[in-house]
């Protein structure tokens, strides 16, 4: 069952409003990533209607509210990673025959556009994965730990524990990555495990949304509701007001 609201009600409640207006959506439209913004809009346009899913989402966001966590990733890393993963042209795949690139990498100015995208994309993913490991540990740092049973977090944790990702995360991006390693990382990240990497990024974009919502709740002193089963036909509200 989907949750739908007619256009007139949306306008009366000022859910979206006009661009630049003080709408409900504008309150939360502060994500750090472009894809996070897209997920936020999708959540607004297609709200949950299942009581268990609603309460699970509330529980996850409330946890971020309690631990007061910030979005720990550099925004520009995701632009580099997405551009890199988006190039699936086999002709740009690094190979051991292209050893000449190793010399080029000593001076990135001399590297052609495709090679720059590859190198920058790999190093961006290394940094993202390194920070993601730290981030997930922080989610489990207090007594209440809803993310320990969260399916998305469990799936990402399993991906991060694979031999390939563990080895990748050990790279030092402050120093030039040797060409022979770039060949391994490129073939793995862009071709063999591309979907897994996209899943990891998708998880972070969702966390971007949840962190943003938690920040708004902190700033505005919002409280978290509890959804009741529809068969109870009950709604209890106290101290309720329109946020704008």
Image: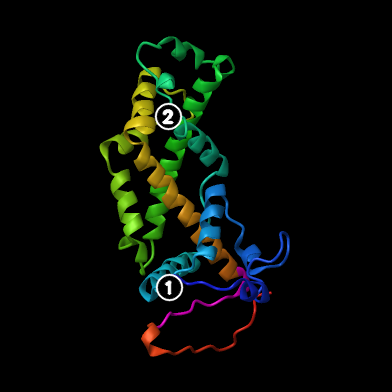
Vertical position of residue 125 compared to residue 101: above or below: below
For the point 51% across and 34% down, which residue is it?
83
Disc nearer the start of the sequence (2/1): 1
Q: Is residue 197 left or right of residue 31?
A: left
Start and end of the magenta stretch? Answer: 219-228
Q: How is the image coloured?
A: rainbow
For the point 52% across and 39% down, which residue is it?
77
Magenta segment: does it hold 134? no
Q: Nearer the viewer, residue 124 or 14?
A: 14
Q: Quadrant of the C terminus?
A: bottom right
SS category of the residue bearing label 2 = loop
Vertical position of residue 119 compared to residue 218: above or below: above
Magenta segment: does it hold 226? yes
- Please provide percent x and percent y for residue 161: 28, 44
Q: Quadrant of the N terminus?
A: bottom left
**Which residue is denoted by mark 1 in the rendering?**
49
> What is the crowding at mark 1: few (fewer than 14 residues within 10 Å), some, or many (at least 20)?
some
For the point 28% across and 48% down, which residue is it?
158
Vertical position of residue 117 compared to residue 106: above or below: below
- Please provide percent x and percent y for residue 22: 71, 67
Between marks 2 and 1, how big is the CA–CA gap? 38 Å
Q: Residue furthest left?
A: 163
> What is the crowding at mark 2: few (fewer than 14 residues within 10 Å), some, or many (at least 20)?
few
**Which residue is denoted by mark 2 in the rendering?**
88
Vertical position of residue 80 compared to residue 219: above or below: above
């Amino acid at each position: 069952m989907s949750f739908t609201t007619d256009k007139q009600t949306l306008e009366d409640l000022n859910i979206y409003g006009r661009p630049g207006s003080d709408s409900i959506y504008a309150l939360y439209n502060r994500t750090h990533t472009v894809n996070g913004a897209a997920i936020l809009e999708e959540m607004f346009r297609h709200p949950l209607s299942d009581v268990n899913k609603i309460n699970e989402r509330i529980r996850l966001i409330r946890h971020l509210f309690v631990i007061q966590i910030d979005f720990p990733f550099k925004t520009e890393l995701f632009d580099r990673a997405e551009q890199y993963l988006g190039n699936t042209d086999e002709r740009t795949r690094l190979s051991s025959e292209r050893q000449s690139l190793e010399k080029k990498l000593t001076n990135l100015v001399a590297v052609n556009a495709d090679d720059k995208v590859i190198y920058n994309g790999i190093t961006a993913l290394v940094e993202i994965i390194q920070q993601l490991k730290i981030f997930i540990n922080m989610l489990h740092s207090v007594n209440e730990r809803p993310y320990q049973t969260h399916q998305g977090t469990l799936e990402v944790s399993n991906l991060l524990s694979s031999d390939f990702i563990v080895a990748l995360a050990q790279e030092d991006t402050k120093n030039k990555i040797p060409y022979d390693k770039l060949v391994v990382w490129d073939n793995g990240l862009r071709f063999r495990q591309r979907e897994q990497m996209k899943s990891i990024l998708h998880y972070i974009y969702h966390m971007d949304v949840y962190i943003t919502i938690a920040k708004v709740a902190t700033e505005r002193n919002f409280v978290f509701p509890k959804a009741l089963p529809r068969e109870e036909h009950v709604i209890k509200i106290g101290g309720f007001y329109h946020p704008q």
